[in-house]
């Protein structure tokens, strides 16, 4: 019996000596975060690592005040990254975090090289593949919306037409308007805003943030495949960009040609938002 007791006591002493002599111990005293052995504990090592990373805070939290070590460890463990990015804001294939620790993956396409382009989009042998066209997303978020360009994120409307004295969006018909308000199609309007209206005003009059696109926005739309994605694409479209006091820029969405011409000339109107 004495032999058994002696062996047990020796084992306990040996184990205690091993723990005390090791680099780490498992925990600190609960009152002052200090290991009784004087050795660095796993918790202290974790705390030091978190401090080095500038994570967490020693301040008390919703759990109460557990002391500087545990406050920092718990606050670091419960931290959630914040942000306002959506999958459509982040480049396709890239990962991100927003308001959670669940990783998101972006879906937004970006402009890229097009070394395989063989023809302009309106050429007989042209197709979306050999002209590097992107696939646009149908958008019905507001009246008149048709599709969203995945590269720029711009929503493109159907063409405008004058139906009697009312200006409206149409997927199957259109009207040619002057850039200024000199043409008859720009005059005698009763709705949505009455009077003689310029091309810029005709888009803005539709509300919901609609506006006339700039020259470069129209050019980028062609690059991204407007010819293959929008209804009634094969028209010259007025831009909001002036060339001189008497001329403005337009873009032909079938082949990307852009030029300037008198503001009294008539072209179709397509709005963006």
Image (cartoon, grey):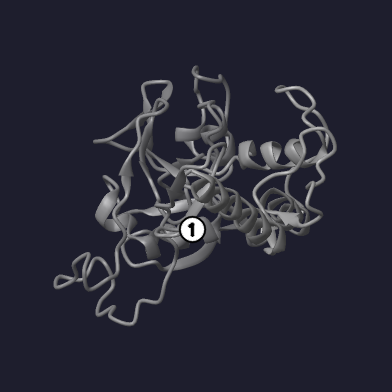
Task: Report the residue at 69% width, 48% height from top.
Answer: 43
Image position of 92 (left or right of 90): left
Q: Position of residue 94 (x, y in %)?
A: 45, 59
Task: Report the residue at 71% width, 63% height from top.
Answer: 21
Considering every residue shown, the one lying at the far front of the view is 2
Give residue 116's quadrant in the image.
bottom left
Q: Is residue 59 visible?
A: yes
Q: Position of residue 83 (x, y in %)?
A: 62, 41
Task: Report the residue at 47% width, 66% height from top.
Answer: 258
Mark 1, secondary structure of its residue: strand
Tell which of 34 and 160 is nearer to you: 34
Give residue 70's quadrant in the image.
top right
Tell which of 91 and 80 is nearer to you: 80
State whether residue 166 is above or below residue 182.
above
Tell which of 231 and 48 is nearer to you: 48
Number of numbered markers: 1
Determine which residue is flagged by label 1.
Answer: 250
Image position of 193 (left or right of 103): right
Tell which of 225 and 264 is nearer to you: 225
Q: Residues within 10 Å of mark 1 (few under 14, many from 20)?
A: many
Task: Report the residue at 69% width, 44% height from top.
Answer: 27
Q: Position of residue 208 (x, y in %)?
A: 53, 27
Q: Position of residue 184 (x, y in %)?
A: 47, 34
Image position of 243 (left or right of 167): right
């Amino acid at each position: 019996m004495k032999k058994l007791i002696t062996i047990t006591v020796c084992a306990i002493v040996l184990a205690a000596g091993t723990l005390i002599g090791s680099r780490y111990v498992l925990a600190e005293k609960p009152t002052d975060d200090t290991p009784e052995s004087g050795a660095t504990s796993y918790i202290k090592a974790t705390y030091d690592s978190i401090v080095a990373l500038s994570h967490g805070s020693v301040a008390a939290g919703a759990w109460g005040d557990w002391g500087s070590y545990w406050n920092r460890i718990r606050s670091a463990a419960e931290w959630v990254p914040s942000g306002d990015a959506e999958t459509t804001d982040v480049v396709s294939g890239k990962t991100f975090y927003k308001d959670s620790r669940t990783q998101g993956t972006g879906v937004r396409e970006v402009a890229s090289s097009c070394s395989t382009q063989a023809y302009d989009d309106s050429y007989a042998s042209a197709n979306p593949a050999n002209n590097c066209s992107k696939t646009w997303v149908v958008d019905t978020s507001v009246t008149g919306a048709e599709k969203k360009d995945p590269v720029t994120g711009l929503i493109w409307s159907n063409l405008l037409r004058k139906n009697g004295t009312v200006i409206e969006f149409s997927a199957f018909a259109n009207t040619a308007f002057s850039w200024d308000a000199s043409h008859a199609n720009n005059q005698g309007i009763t709705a949505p805003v009455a009077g003689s209206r310029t091309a810029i005003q005709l888009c803005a009059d539709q509300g919901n943030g609609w506006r006339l696109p700039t020259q470069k926005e129209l050019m980028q739309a062609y690059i991204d495949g407007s010819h293959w994605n929008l209804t009634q694409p094969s028209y010259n479209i007025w831009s909001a960009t002036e060339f001189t006091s008497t001329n403005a820029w337009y873009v032909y969405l079938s082949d990307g040609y852009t030029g300037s011409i008198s503001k009294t000339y008539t072209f179709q109107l397509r709005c963006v938002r």
